[in-house]
Amino acid sequence: MSADAAIELMLSPESRNNLIIAEGRRNSSVYELIDKRLELKAGTTAEVAETEYRSLGLPDWALERKNVKDPLEGFLYPSSYAVAKGQKPEDVLKQMVERAADKYEELGFEKKAESLGLKGPGNW
């Protein structure tokens, strides 16, 4: 493939397969978007989030939160993600959780919580 053809393909809207998650979307809405993009049965991603959240890369402090309806709340980072049919929902969720966890670490959530006398960012 020529360089010109490669650039044309990259810029073509038909070749883009990104899932864009806007700020303020509820987790349930994100799960629905993932199901649609991956052409999965409705509710598949929500079930994965509920049953496999411990293996999706949440920081330790997030695993210790009690009485949380959705363990991934606050961890589906708004951004653009490369998502294609055939991908597993857990892989998409891992990308989102990793990006959120990195941002929280960059912002120093744990140290800030400690400076406020809290047990951790998720335990107040």
Image (cartoon, grey):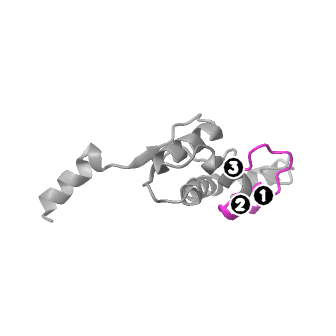
Residue 53, image x, y percentages: 71, 57
Q: Which quarter of the figure is the N terminus placed in?
A: bottom left
Residue located 53% across and 49% down the image:
40
Residue 96 in the image: above or below residue 36: below
> Contact, CB < 8 Å: mark 1 with mark 2?
yes
Residue located 19% across and 59% down the image:
6
Q: Residue furthest top?
A: 24
Q: Which quarter of the figure is the C terminus placed in?
A: top right
SS at circle 1: helix
| Amino acid type, mark 2 | Pro
Mark 2 vs mark 3, foreground winner is 3
- Does residue 66 appear left or right of residue 70 in this picture? right
| Residue matched to label 1 | 63
| Residue matched to label 2 | 59
Residue located 70% across and 45% down the image:
73
Magenta region includes residue 117 = no
User: Bounds of the magenta span?
Assistant: 53-71
| Amino acid type, mark 1 | Leu
Crowding at dot 3, Cα within 10 Å, few <14 / some 14-19 / many 20+, comes out as many
| Amino acid type, mark 3 | Leu
SS at circle 3: loop
Between the residue at mark 3 and the residue at mark 1, the CA separation in whole angstroms equals 10 Å
Residue 17, image x, y percentages: 37, 49
Quadrant for residue 7, please give it: bottom left
Residue 35 disc label: none
| Residue matched to label 3 | 72
Residue 95, image x, y percentages: 54, 57
Between the residue at mark 2 and the residue at mark 3, the CA separation in whole angstroms equals 11 Å
